[in-house]
Image (tube, helix red, strand yellow):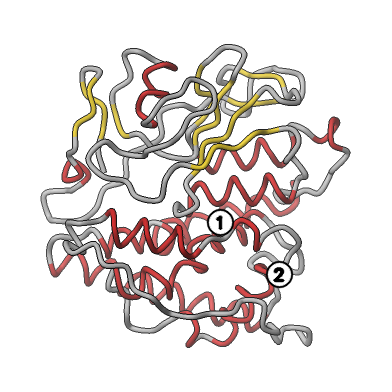
Amino acid sequence: MGLLQNGKWVDKWYDTKNSDGSFRRQASSFRHWITADGEAGPNGEKGFKAEKGRYQLYVSLACPWAHRALIFRELKQLQDYIDVTVVEPIMLENGWELNDPLYEFNFLYQLYLKGDANYEGRVTVPVLWDKHTQTIVSNESSETIRMFNTAFNSLTGNTADYYPLALRQEIDSVNDRIYDTINNGVYRAGFATTQQAYEEACYSLFDSLEWLEKRLTQQRYLVGEQITEADWRLFTTLIRFDAVYFGHFKTNLKRVTDFPAISGYIRELYQVSGVADTVSFEHIKTHYYASHLMINPTGVVPIGPKEDFNLPHGRESL
């Protein structure tokens, strides 16, 4: 990890640590919105109009936060409306590397500085870039997927709603627990530098996985009988769990494969049209094991586990 300070890239992953050795995730800095008419978004920040071909989405296939945006681009049929640039799997002393089609940049931090020459902070994916004004619309994945959910509906004709008004309160409540203990929980365990911080994160993570197993035994999806954004926000962590978090981040009390309901749930979501195309285990494992040298100094990438998410998911009876 690293960040920009005084216009320069600094390799200082430890700046994300608290004094007790626990991992601290910094808030995203760019929080503008794409809306159908270009008016301000829900948070009151500057609006950008939904237009075909205007925006570029920068992602890593390894990153679960960026993966959310890729999935919504598929679900909402935005492939012809929003272009995508995929960064290289390995992230070392200069951060995310890429072959940028717009400006021929070699590193993602250069795009951040083009959007804001005075920017200081972490350089993260996904990045939603506006080609017209040449600036960053958003680097906050939770808001990017909500833009994709509605902003382009009148252009694509796709009105599928993954954040329906009647379910928003419950979706937000579920999201909060899952973000703190699972989405971010795996990182809190993996990047902990004290035994206490690691154990606290790990036990909290598995408490929530047990809660999920019970919930998914009683109902098909996280919020009732329809897929919502809560499911996709969770999916991008679960799909990586056995491949990287179990071993690399030492979240090894159980595999998600050991939870029958969760295991079937992951397979069902994976088999939704277009989703499998957004998953690259080669990219995922290469990034985590070969980039996090403070955790895996040798950079050796494991050859397993071998998993087939196209197998029957066994949830038809729910």
Residue type at numbered disc 2? Gln
The relative height of residue 277 versus residue 104 in the rendered view (above or below) is: below
Left or right of residue 154, residue 296 in this image: left
Residue lying at 59% horizontally and 18% vertically, measured from the top left: 131
- Return the x and y of residue 230 as percentages of the image width and height: 60, 57
Q: Quadrant of residue 20?
A: bottom left
The structure residue drawn at horizontal position 65% and vertical position 26%, both measured from the top left corner, is 34
- Does 152 sit left or right of 200 as displayed? right
Q: Which quarter of the figure is the C terminus placed in?
A: bottom right
Where does residue 229 sit, x and y in percent of width and height? 64, 54
Element marked by disc 2 = loop
| Residue at 76% from the left image edge and 45% from the top image edge | 76
Q: Distance of mark 2 from mark 1, alpha carbons? A: 16 Å
Q: Is residue 250 above or below residue 253?
A: above
User: Which of the marked residues, 2 or 1, is nearer the chain's N terminus?
Assistant: 1
Q: Secondary structure at mark 1?
A: helix
Q: Residue 156, position in %: x, y? A: 84, 36
Q: Quadrant of residue 190?
A: bottom left
- Picture disc at residue 103: none
Q: Which of 165/261 is in front?
A: 261
User: Residue 232 falls in which quadrant of the image?
Assistant: bottom right
Residue placed under numbered mark 1 in the picture: 233
Q: What's the amino acid at mark 1?
A: Arg
Near mark 1 (Cα within 10 A), the count class, few <14, some 14-19 or many ≥20, is: many
With respect to residue 181, does 107 lie above or below? above
Please give the residue where the numbered disc 2 appears in the rendered image: 271
Report x, y in % for residue 246: 35, 75
232 in relation to 308, above or below = above
